[in-house]
Image (cartoon, grey):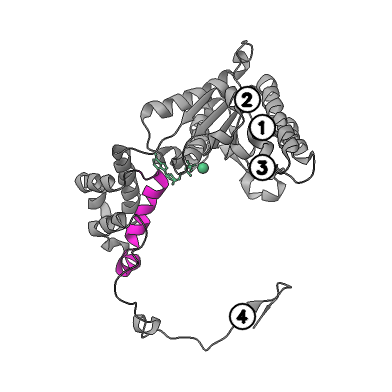
Amino acid sequence: MMDRARTALPPGVLSMHVLPAEHHDRDWDAIVVPRAVKERLLAQALLVLRHGRKLSMLAGLPHGLIVLAGPPGTGKTTMARGLAQVAALALAHEGSTTLLEINPHAFPSDMLGESQRNVTRLLTETIPEIAARRPFTVVLIDEVESFAVRRSSASFEANPVDVHRATDAVLLGIDEIARNLPSVLFVTTTNFMEAVDEAFLSRADLVMRFALPDTATIAKILESALGELAVQWPALQPMAADTERIARLAAMCEGWDGRRIRKLVLAALAQRLEVARDPSGLAWEDFFEAARKKGGVEWAGPAAPTAREMFPGVHRHAHTHQHEDDDGHSHS
Ligand SMILES: Nc1ncnc2c1ncn2[C@@H]1O[C@H](COP(=O)(O)OP(=O)(O)O)[C@@H](O)[C@H]1O
Ligand SMILES: [Mg+2]
């Protein structure tokens, strides 16, 4: 509901959701990791959201900060969103949860001192105001390396002083929220941990490192992807159940990330025009071909037919040409 009112979102906020929400279970379910990983993540989140106030009395108070780090395409963002929904489900009997997604690229600025002011406004005004609306708040900061820029390497930046001050403002803001708003949880992701400020990382209650999936995990991801396909085209159900061929296919995808593995399904569907027209005709050979080509295309074979040869019977409209000029008006 709320994210439809995009114009009303405060600066730097990408989206806002009230959780638990319908259709938000999917993210958590999509990511194949050992049970212990999801349990640890959920426990960490619940600890802060539910007991943050009591824990903030401890000398080693939690900062309410989780960092999900690892190579691109390993499920960090999806897992972060899923975590917000599942934590909200666990807390639903005590009240609802706001999920706030921050745009980390909204803060750097060419104007001296402006980044620092923007960060300070976000952490001392925007987030506290939003956190006051519901009992629990999860703040997702994707690509946090552009938000909490590592100060020791910022000397190469265009405006190192400004970067320094912005990161200082992040740390101050996080510390203040940890003290005053202990049931706010920050879930952050990064593909590039070396670029995240060390003092920010040391505040994390949990740094979870994601790795590329092993062959057994690849097989599970393929199985899940095929299962989704079979929901849309029930003729493909036997493929989704063929564990032996799935294992063979998984062996061909060694070293791939999760995103690329899920995209293999699309590549398989696009191996032959007939299958693109009717996916029910998908065959194992299409998967093995797609995997052999590593999801890409082979630049070999006979020349392609012309458009008219491919679609002889299709009526073509009389030639008209439309373009947009500099004013944005279209002319024909
Ligand atoms: N371990 C995994 N299990 C299942 N799917 C995965 C896994 N890792 C990544 N994916 C899929 O890859 C895609 C990209 O994931 P994303 O969360 O954007 O990765 P990241 O944030 O690490 O770059 C999503 O469709 C996700 O479902
Ligand atoms: Mg991501």
Q: Is residue 303 above or below residue 261?
A: below
Q: Quadrant of residue 291?
A: bottom left
User: Can you tell which of label 3 and label 2 is closer to the viewer?
Assistant: 2
Name the image quarter holding the C terminus: bottom right
Q: Is residue 222 above or below residue 96?
A: below
Q: Pointer 2: what residue?
A: 199
Q: Are marks 3 and 2 in contact (CB under 8 Å)?
A: no
Residue type indicated by callout 4? Gln
Question: CA separation, marks 4 and 3?
Answer: 37 Å
Q: Residues within 10 Å of mark 4 (few under 14, many from 20)?
A: few
Q: Position of residue 220 (x, y in %)?
A: 31, 41
Q: Is residue 215 magenta?
A: no
Q: Is residue 167 above or below residue 1?
A: above
Q: If you read the primary sequence from the N terminus, does the residue marked by circle 4 or circle 3 appear first? A: 3
Tell whether 284 sits left or right of 221.
left
Q: Pointer 1: what residue?
A: 151
Q: Pointer 4: what residue?
A: 322
Picture mark count: 4
